[in-house]
Structures are given as structure tokens and as C-alpha cells.
């Protein structure tokens, strides 16, 4: 398919080529209505700017943010930290929850394109690295760079900040190995998820050849599916000596089942969570976990997003963040 040119835009918008060029390189010299008409046509024709100076929209000092589950303390906390860090630099953040829905994710990204944000910070609904929402191509055509968080994709994007999932699993396995458990159950997200693969691989590597029977229940990273999958497993298997929850929502599902079975966590069954379980001490439960520094992650994400607004045609960094073992 031939690349859209300035002449194509000028012809459809009913203006001269030099007016189109000015709309991208010196937007203050073009009447607002004319500029908006040119930018609308450019988006419709999927025009891709040749350089950072040819932005399809003038700078708005506004960033878009989309995550898959704001009720998850990880994503909710990260949204808060990114918003505060952006405000400190004079940027407004428009935040959307995609509710683990591809349709909602598409709608949210479409709204952000309408608002002509300077960059989009995105945690996609899928942890499949081959997931490629069409919205990413539309954002790229509109000259709006995308920075990924937590979940990595092969699809074109500016850069991303990701959790070191292999290390998370390794630290969890090392901790459980020291507890002298003979049977261990890991409750994870989908088996084909890159997050699951990384965390379960790290867990197995840490256990090594130790005489520990390991079983894995694959389900989802949200509470209800994890609860149902674990309940079904326990209906046919005895409780293990220890359980590793692959994220905070899964660990909450484990705690609910402990309560239903009348078991006391850490006395009757050793628990470990990849992700903090905030305020669990209020209920008299101390759960060792992998803690991630959300303010630090937010700063790294924001630095990438702001760099992307300056040079959207370039490629940013891939940053991997390590979690810290927290025992109390």
C-alpha cells in the first residue's frame, strides 16, 4: 500500500501542501479550524510523520494511561504514582480501566486518540507476548507513542518497563525451599502467559533437585477464576505444605479457601505471595512476598513517556525491574 503523502492530505483537506506542512511543523501559523481539518484527514489516511517535528497533534501536556484492572492494588497503586509524578512535571493524566476486556481497551485507546494525548502508557489485557491490538497501529499512524508497563508485546511500541518475573519465581522458590516443605502448590495465571512462564520457571529453578513435590494450578491472575480453580483442585487433592500465589489476587483467593477450610496460614500451610498483600497484618497474617517499588516504577515509566513525546519516531529502552523479598 503506497505511503500517504502531504499532497494526499492537502488534496483531501482542500488546502495547499505548504499549509499541510505548516500544520505539522509550525501549527501556531495555521488557523485552528484549518489545522484540525488537516489533522483529521491525516488520521483518516493513516499518515505516519517522517520525524518528531511532524506531530499529528500539537503538544497537550496530557498523557493517557490504560490498565486492565484498577481494583488490583498493583495497577491501582501504579496509576496513582504515575498520576502524581506526571502532575509534578506539569502533565495531566487521563486514566482508563479496561476491565480485562479487549473491547473496553479498544474503546479507551480510541478515546485517548480523540483527546490527542502526547503519549499513552499501556498495560494490555493480555500477557501473551503475541497479542497485537489494532489500536496500537492506529496510535502509531496518529504519531502517538506507546509505552508498555508490566506486560510485554512484540507489537511495535516505544519502550517499556517490566517486572523481572523469572527472579520473582526464583525468590519465591528459594524461600519455600528454606521452609523445608515436602509438597508445594503454585497457583498461577494462564499457562501460555509470559508472566506465568517466567514466574513458574524461576520457581522450578530455585527448587532444583530438592525432594519437593511441586504441582501447578493454572487459571487467571484475577480473584474469582483463581478461587474457582483452586477450590476444584482441593476437592480432589490434599492440602500441600506450602502454596505460592503468583500475584496478590491469587493469594487472596488462597486466603479465602484457608478460611473456608479452617486452616491458619503459616501454621497449617506456608504461604508466599508474588506481590504485596496490603494490610494483611490487620487480620493477624504475615505473608512473605515480593515487593515492587511502585513509585520507582512510575518514575521510570514517566521518563520513557516524556522521552517518547520528544522523539516518537525513535525506540526507547526496555527496562526490567526486580522485586524485593519482604518477610514481614
Image (cartoon, rainbow, N blue to C red):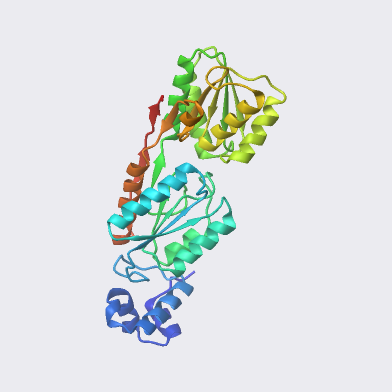
Position of 258 with respect to 285 (left or right) is right
Residue at the spot 52% in from the left edge and 50% down from the top edge: 68
Please, is residue 287 above or below residue 78 in the view? above
Can residue 248 be seen in the rendering of this structure? yes
Can residue 152 be seen in the rendering of this structure? no
Residue at the spot 52% in from the left edge and 44% down from the top edge: 127
- Residue 166 coordinates in the image, percent (x, y): 44, 31
Please, is residue 206 above or below residue 88 in the view? above
- Residue 35 coordinates in the image, percent (x, y): 36, 80
Q: Disc count in the image?
A: 0
Residue reaching furthest right?
A: 236
Residue at the spot 50% in from the left edge and 14% down from the top edge: 209
User: The C terminus appears in which quarter of the rendering?
Assistant: top left
Query: In the depicted view, which residue is nearer to us: 19 or 300?
Result: 300
Which quarter of the picture shows residue 314?
A: bottom left
Position of 60 with respect to 110 (left or right) is left
- Residue 140 coordinates in the image, percent (x, y): 43, 62
Position of 225 with respect to 152 (left or right) is right
Query: In the depicted view, which residue is nearer to us: 309 or 177?
Result: 177
- Residue 97 coordinates in the image, percent (x, y): 51, 54
Amino acid at each position: 500500500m503506497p505511503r500517504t503523502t502531504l499532497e494526499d492530505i492537502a488534496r483531501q483537506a482542500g488546502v495547499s501542501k505548504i499549509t499541510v506542512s505548516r500544520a505539522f511543523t509550525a501549527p501556531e501559523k495555521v488557523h485552528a479550524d484549518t489545522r484540525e481539518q488537516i489533522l483529521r484527514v491525516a488520521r483518516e489516511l493513516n499518515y505516519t510523520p517522517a520525524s518528531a517535528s511532524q506531530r499529528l497533534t500539537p503538544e497537550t501536556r496530557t498523557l493517557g494511561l490504560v490498565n486492565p484492572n484498577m481494583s488490583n492494588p498493583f495497577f491501582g497503586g501504579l496509576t496513582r504514582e504515575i498520576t502524581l509524578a506526571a502532575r509534578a512535571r506539569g502533565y495531566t493524566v487521563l486514566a482508563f480501566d479496561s476491565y480485562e476486556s479487549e473491547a473496553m481497551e479498544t474503546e479507551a485507546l480510541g478515546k485517548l486518540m480523540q483527546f490527542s494525548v502526547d503519549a499513552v502508557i499501556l498495560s494490555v489485557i493480555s500477557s501473551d507476548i503475541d497479542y497485537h491490538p489494532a489500536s496500537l497501529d492506529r496510535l502509531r499512524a496518529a504519531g502517538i507513542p506507546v509505552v508498555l508497563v508490566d506486560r510485554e508485546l512484540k507489537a511495535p511500541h516505544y519502550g517499556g518497563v517490566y517486572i523481572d518475573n523469572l527472579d520473582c519465581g526464583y525468590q519465591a522458590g528459594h524461600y519455600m525451599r528454606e521452609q523445608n516443605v515436602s509438597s508445594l502448590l503454585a497457583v498461577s495465571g494462564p499457562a501460555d502467559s509470559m508472566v506465568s512462564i517466567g514466574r513458574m520457571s524461576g520457581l522450578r529453578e530455585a527448587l532444583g533437585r530438592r525432594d519437593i513435590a511441586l504441582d501447578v494450578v493454572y487459571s487467571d491472575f484475577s480473584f474469582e477464576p483463581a478461587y474457582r480453580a483452586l477450590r476444584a483442585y482441593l476437592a480432589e487433592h490434599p492440602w500441600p505444605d506450602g502454596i505460592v500465589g503468583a500475584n496478590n489476587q491469587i493469594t487472596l483467593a488462597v486466603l479465602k479457601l484457608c478460611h473456608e477450610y479452617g486452616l491458619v496460614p503459616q501454621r497449617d500451610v506456608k504461604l508466599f505471595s508474588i506481590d504485596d498483600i496490603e494490610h494483611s497484618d490487620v487480620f493477624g497474617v504475615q505473608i512473605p512476598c515480593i515487593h515492587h517499588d511502585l513509585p520507582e516504577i512510575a518514575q521510570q515509566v514517566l521518563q520513557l513517556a516524556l522521552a517518547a513525546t520528544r522523539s516518537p519516531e525513535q525506540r526507547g529502552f526496555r527496562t526490567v525491574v526486580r522485586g524485593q523479598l519482604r518477610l514481614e
